Each structure stands twice: as structure tokens, then as C-alpha cells.
Amino acid sequence: MEVLTVPEMEQADRLAIAGGQSGFALMLRAGQAVADAAMDLAEEGAILVVAGRGNNGGDGFVAATELVARGREVSVILLCERESLKGDAALAAKGWKGPVLPCDLSMLGAPALIIDALFGAGLNRPVKGDPHAMIEAINANGAPVLSVDLPSGINGTTGMVMGTAVRATETVTFFRKKPAHLLLPGRVHCGRVRVADIGIDVAVLDEIRPTTFENLPDSWQEAFPVPHIDGHKYARGHAVVVSGDATSTGAARLAARGALRAGAGLVTVLSPGGAIAVNAAALTAVMVRRVDTAAEFAEVLTDRRLNACVIGPGAGIGDGTRALVLAALSAKPALVLDADALTSFADAPDRLFEAIKSVGNSEIVLTPHEGEFRRLFSEMSNKHPLRSKLERVRDAAERSGAIVLLKGPDTVVASPDGRATIAANAPPWLASAGSGDVLSGMIGGMLAQGVPAFEAASIGVWMHGEAGHEAGPGLIAEDLPEVLPAVLRGLYDRFGIEY
């Protein structure tokens, strides 16, 4: 589940070599893993390897040699002079006994499979010239494509397309995934991703100390809340959700239902008087309480049993919502700020960030989508427009002093201490009105149960994605809380928890 940046993966290679492995032995295992994947993708027919000058090309030569040994017909195109290869790549090319074809687009033909071994993950400049033309030709060929490490043209750390990039059917990477396997647009270009063991000891991670992880249950299992047989609803926390006025109540109710289904023992919607009837008529297990002003809100929060709060969904934009947020920060419950709560500070983000840092509450989660993120962190976004999503969210967490969750098909959660998770399990039909409100409530429900904010946000994101799969195409936001029991049962089975 650890995700390594390109420099961290290079360090893993160096540590493996320092521990007695040879670089060429690692390349041999990598090439063999590529050959295994190629055999799975194309059970018969000719295979074409398109190789570049670096170690990625060396992996391609090893794969070609291995595939011929397994009885396959293989051709190799090399985008540089064979004599210009160096180091392990030169050794790998020396082991290839077949012809090496020149960089001629007409040589692609109609293979059963193309192995893309042009560029590795460290590409950091736009692709031009012959490589650009070759990538375009690979994409136009129509044959399935197996990329080595990453599709050529993708930056391994940012996931960005460097001018053009191969669109792979499958990608074989080694030891651990890189951010580009999870971040868009890189993930779209990768197709299916398989991670091959090439003999690097996992102990190297103790020295590398990675801070990025794929958002998977194993990364937060220890923090996952499980009710005890001798427990009661008050032990599972009491979450409150702030409602907007009578015409904007639905978002808060969605969040409240998400909090309750996520496991909070009690949930109350705090509603303006003018919306009490609307909310009360639509809620059953979720309670309703009248709150009209920030002062009344602050008074409610003096009850320490109300230990988690969600502000933002349908709350309205302006001074009133700002006052509610500042009151909640002063009262120090675990806090989720979403939607209108964030946009209300778009013209004065430092006021929010200073308030977060001054209260010394580490259990605060900000959950913007891309538009809200740009509004709240506009100066940073404008200053570094080409930074990766992972880097932007990390910077935002450090600046704000809160856990920041930037929503999307590749949702990133980052902590001010540098930890981050990247999710890759969200189906496209989650892009539906109200879906994010349910997510905010789910995170609030986790916070109410005492889950630390970083883990609460990561758990909420993963469960939200799984709920999307469980509900299936055509889902609407109201479906998400109702399928959470199935998602929770799956987690219990996975963790070996009896129920």
C-alpha cells in the first residue's frame, strides 16, 4: 500500500544493490515479469517491443529474450543507436540475439501485442520528435499495449502527460506503485496495473519512510471503529450537522444520514426555526434541534457529548456561516468543514487558517472539491498551477493546519505532518448531486466514534467509493447511506471481525 515517488523508488533500487543485489539481476526479474504479463495479454501471435535508451528499454530487451525462449515471435524497435546504450541496458541488449529494427513507424505492423518500453517513470520533459511520433503511432495501431513501469509520456511523480503518452491496456510496475499509477490522468493511461516482486526487500521501506499510501483498508485497519458488545449509543459519539434554511435542507439531511450509517451513536440536525418543520417531517432516527444564531450554536456545543460536527452542506454562504464555523472551532469538537463553510472564507482564507491553528484542535477536516479548493487556496493554486494534486493537497494541509481532502476520482487526503492517501476505488457514477454531502457526514460519523481525523477522512473516502460500487450505475446520493451496511459487512469479513 506504500506509494513511492520516483526519487524514493530510485533509493529503493540503490538500497537493494547496496544489500547485495545487482542492478542487472533486478532488471532480469523485471523483464521476466513483463514477459509473464505479455503471455497473459496475448496467448498467441507476434509481439512487438518498442524500446528506449534507458533502463526501461533494458527491461524491454530482457522481456523480448524471455518471450523468444518461451516460443513466441518477437520483434524489437529501438529508438536510439544500439551502441549508445549503457550499463545494465547495454547488457540486456547484448542478450537479445534477434534483429533490432530502426525507428520506422511502418515497422509497427499488426502485432498481437505491443510492449511499450520507451520511457521510465522519471520522464520530466515534454516528449518530442521521433518518440512523440512513435507514441502516437502506438496509440493509433489498435493492438493491446503493455507498458513497462509506466506508460511512456507519463511523469511518475505527478501523473501528468508530458506532451503525449501511451494509452496502455495494462501496466507492469515493480516493488511498489508510484503516484502516477493512482493520480489522474496517469491512472487512465495505465489501464490495469500489476505490481511485480523483483526481489527488493521490504525492509528498505524502513529507511525510505514513505509518507504516501494507496487508500486501502490495510492502511487504516487499526483505527477502524468496531462497536463492543457491552457498548451503548453514547459510547459511539454524537454528531451534529448544521442545516441551511427551509429551501436548502436536503444536503444537511444527506450528511446526517451518512453520519448515522457510518456508525455514530446519535446524530442531530441543528436547524433554523424556519426549517424545523421541513427537517422534522423528513427525519426519523436523526433528531432535530432548533438553532438560529451562532451564539445559540456555541451554547449547544458546550455539551461535550456532542463530539463531532459537520458544517457546510446547504449551510449558505456568508457571515452567518462564518460565525458558525468560528464558534465550532472555539468549542473544539471534531469538525468537518465542507461546501458553503469553505466558500464563506474564500475572500479571507487566512482568517480560517489562523483560527484553526489558534485553537489547537487537530481533529479538523476540510473537504473541498476542485472549485472550492481553488477558491480557498487561490494564491497557492495560481503560484503553482502545474503542481500535482498530491503536492497541492499536501501544501494546503500544511498551510491550513487541518486535514485536507480534495475530492475527485483520485481523492487525496493529506495531513499537516505530510502523510497522504490516494484513493482509486471511486466509480464514475459517484459524480452525482449530494454525493459529497454524504461523504462529509460519513467522515463526521467516524470522528464521532473517536477515529483520528486523517484516518477518519481516509476511511470515509474508501467507504464512499465502495458504496458507489455497491449501489451501481444510476445511483443517487440517497442510495449511498443505505448500502453502507453491505460495505461494513465486507470490511468486517476482510478484517476477520465476527458480527
Image: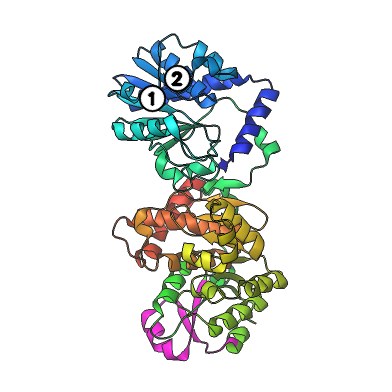
Asked if residue 463 lies left or right of residue 202, the reply is: left
The colour style of the image is rainbow
- Provide the residue span drawn in magenta: 266-294
Asked if disc 1 and disc 2 are in contact, CB closer than 8 Å, the reply is yes
The residue lying at 48 percent from left, 25 percent from top is: 52
282 and 407: which is toward the camera = 407
Q: Say left or right for 301 vs 82.
A: right
Q: Earlier in the sequence, mark 1 or mark 2?
A: 1
Residue 38 numbered tag: 1
Q: Which secondary structure lies at badge 2?
A: helix
Residue 228 appears in view? no
Residue furthest front as drawn = 129
What is the number of the mark on residue 63? 2
For badge 2, the amino acid type reads Ala
Amino acid type, mark 1: Ala
Q: Secondary structure at mark 1?
A: helix
Q: Position of residue 375 (x, y in %)?
A: 53, 68
Cα separation between marks 1 and 2: 9 Å
Quadrant position of the N terminus in the picture: top right
